[in-house]
Image: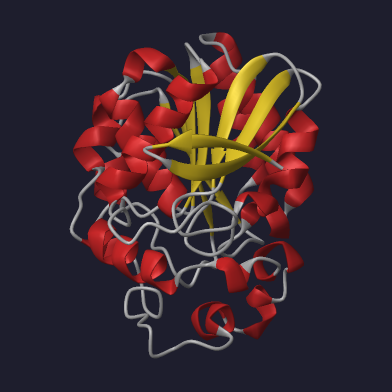
């Protein structure tokens, strides 16, 4: 277990591999742990980091830091502590929201961005996540996801460590946000990934995607729900690997067509 001190509090992270840096940021349900397969897959060419946000996993709880802005500050300070001049960001759910907002804040430090199962507006968060409260303790992940989805050990393993206040308050914070302008301001390559059967996050609307620039790629995985990195691990890691190697021009067009064939 590795850790850094940010604002006087402990932030847990894990790192593997060598090469260009990639930071993985988890979502509302889980911790760094569900990134293990993706991190291992990239480790031959990249230095993969995954941290626990405030109130999750083995990072300290901070009752005053469960807002979107506080999480963005946390990841930005993590980038500084690790001495990363330029990095890729990969975020899921809440982590995807944090990644988009951070990329818009410090675009010169972000090489590319992957956001998975990420609500681009507050209204994209569907019940029961949007209506979750601390009265729903116990097996709270099953209450949100249903028992089949909640069965993933990578999700359940550290659920007891989660401060439910971090889930509730950060959901409330994100519900008040609109990330469309942040997303559309980005010029680096951006990959948005959604599970077609996700019960918690609604995908982008067609009239948004029609105005996006060529740097934004949108992929819907037919056999995935809220956790594409677990439900379709092989396809997801292949997709991530291709995107990390993505350049421009003809290469971009060829990969765009390949993804389209795979996700029909």
Q: Is residue 95 above or below residue 100?
A: below
Counting labels gives 0
Q: Nearer the viewer, residue 191 or 252?
A: 191
Q: Quadrant of residue 155?
A: bottom right
The answer to whether residue 157 is seen in the rendering is: yes
The x and y percentages for residue 57 are 58, 57
The x and y percentages for residue 110 are 43, 20
Which residue: 55% across, 89% down? 138
The x and y percentages for residue 98 are 37, 42
Q: Nearer the viewer, residue 52 or 125?
A: 52
Which residue: 63% across, 32% down? 49
Colouring style:
secondary structure
Which residue: 24% across, 42% down? 180
Which residue: 35% across, 52% down? 204
The answer to whether residue 189 is seen in the rendering is: no
Q: Is residue 209 left or right of residue 20?
A: left
What is the quadrant of the N terminus in the image?
Answer: top right
Q: Is residue 43 left or right of residue 96?
A: right
Q: Quadrant of residue 209?
A: top left
Q: Nearer the viewer, residue 207 or 72?
A: 72
Q: Quadrant of residue 44?
A: top right
Q: Is residue 175 above or below residue 17?
A: below
């Amino acid at each position: 277990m590795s850790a850094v001190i940010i604002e006087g509090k402990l932030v847990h992270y894990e790192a593997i591999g060598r090469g260009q840096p990639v930071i993985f940021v988890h979502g509302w349900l889980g911790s760094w742990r569900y990134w293990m397969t993706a991190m291992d897959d990239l480790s031959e060419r990249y230095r993969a980091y995954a941290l626990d946000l405030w109130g999750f996993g083995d990072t300290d709880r901070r009752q005053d830091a469960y807002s979107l802005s506080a999480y963005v500050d946390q990841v930005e300070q993590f980038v500084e502590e690790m001495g990363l001049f330029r990095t890729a960001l990969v975020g899921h759910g809440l982590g995807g929201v944090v990644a988009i907002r951070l990329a818009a804040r410090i675009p010169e430090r972000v090489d590319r961005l992957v956001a998975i199962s990420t609500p681009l507006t507050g209204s994209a968060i569907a019940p029961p996540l949007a209506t979750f409260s601390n009265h729903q303790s116990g097996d709270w992940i099953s209450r949100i996801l249903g028992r089949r989805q909640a069965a993933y050990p990578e999700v359940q393993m550290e659920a007891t460590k989660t401060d439910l206040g971090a889930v509730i308050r950060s959901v409330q914070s994100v519900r008040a946000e609109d990330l469309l302008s942040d997303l559309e301001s980005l010029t680096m390559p951006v990959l948005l990934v959604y599970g077609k059967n996700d019960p918690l996050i609604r995908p982008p609307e067609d009239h948004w995607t029609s105005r996006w620039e060529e740097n934004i790629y949108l992929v819907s995985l037919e056999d995935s729900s809220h956790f594409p990195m677990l439900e379709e691990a092989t396809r997801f890691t292949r997709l991530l690997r291709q995107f990390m190697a993505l350049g421009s021009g003809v290469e971009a067009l060829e990969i765009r067509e390949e993804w389209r064939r795979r996700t029909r």
